[in-house]
Amino acid sequence: MPDIDVDFMDSRRDEVIKYVMDKYGADRVAQIITFGTMGARAAIRDVGRAMGLPYGDVDRIAKMIPGPTVTLKEAIEAEPELRETSERDPQIRRLLDLAQKLEGVARHASTHAAGVIIARDPLIEQVPLQRATKGDLVMTQYDMNSVAAIGLLKMDFLGLTNLTVLDAAIRIIRETRGVEIDLARIRPGSSSLRAAACAGTSRTCAPTGSRTSWRWSRCSAPARWRTSRPTSAGSTARSR
């Protein structure tokens, strides 16, 4: 099934979901569950708590993990102090062994930030459901990969702050200057837009609003709009 992304103002995303529910039926629309998995540091802290080890000792071991995406196996191989501590202290070795077993296990459930399922038939006949973690909406108990695997249509209704900012800017200009701005008539290759990106004033613009893209735009200062595309593409790929 296709994965369709549509951008909306974050202040009006709930209106879009309500429209879809009114149009297709509330029993055919649901948000999607997502699972937060246990990283290396969280696994160490949880296991250390269960083992009754002193918090200071457990915290010291957890802080030896060099980053949030580094696995315990990688950390033990890369950090001599962690490896030596494990070899010297049987309790720490047991702590790390148990933590590795829990690493990657689902720790909590929440609602996917953008995903919405729209089905032809009532969803209760196709997938287990539950109340969303926030609000009164329903969400699937299958994650986004599982709902796609059983053939359900997943839409990403992305609520973007920059679209809300643009809407507010247009309204303020209309009210204070009496000028009506039509965004569709602004040329993408405009020199003023390029200058704004190079000056670092694009923090509220997607996708150049991300910290990485913003810094790249300032550093590279592309002479033409066409040459700025790799910056935008690279930043988007990096964020995924």
Image (cartoon, grey):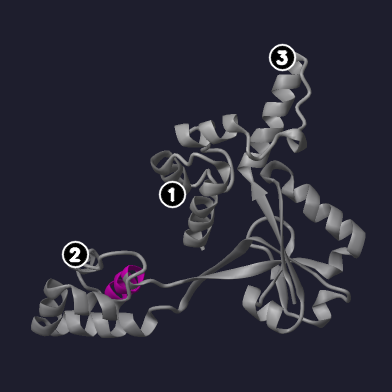
Q: Is residue 5 magenta?
A: no
- Which residue is the site of mark 2? 60
Q: Position of residue 81 (x, y in %)?
A: 12, 72
Amino acid carrying label 2: it is Arg
Q: Is residue 42 magenta?
A: yes
Q: Residue at x 62, y 63 (%)?
A: 112
The image quarter in which residue 59 lies: bottom left
Along the viewing direction, whichever of 85 and 175 lies nearer the viewer: 175
Separation of residues labelled 3 and 2 (CA atoms): 57 Å
Whether residues under marks 3 and 2 lie with C-beta atoms below 8 angstroms apart, the answer is: no
Q: Residue at x 76, y 20 (%)?
A: 174
Provide the secondary structure element on which disc 1 rests. Answer: helix
- Which residue is the site of mark 3? 176
The image quarter in which residue 194 lies: top right
- Which residue is the site of mark 1? 212
Query: Does the rendering let one see residue 155?
Result: yes
Mark closer to the observer (3, 2):
3
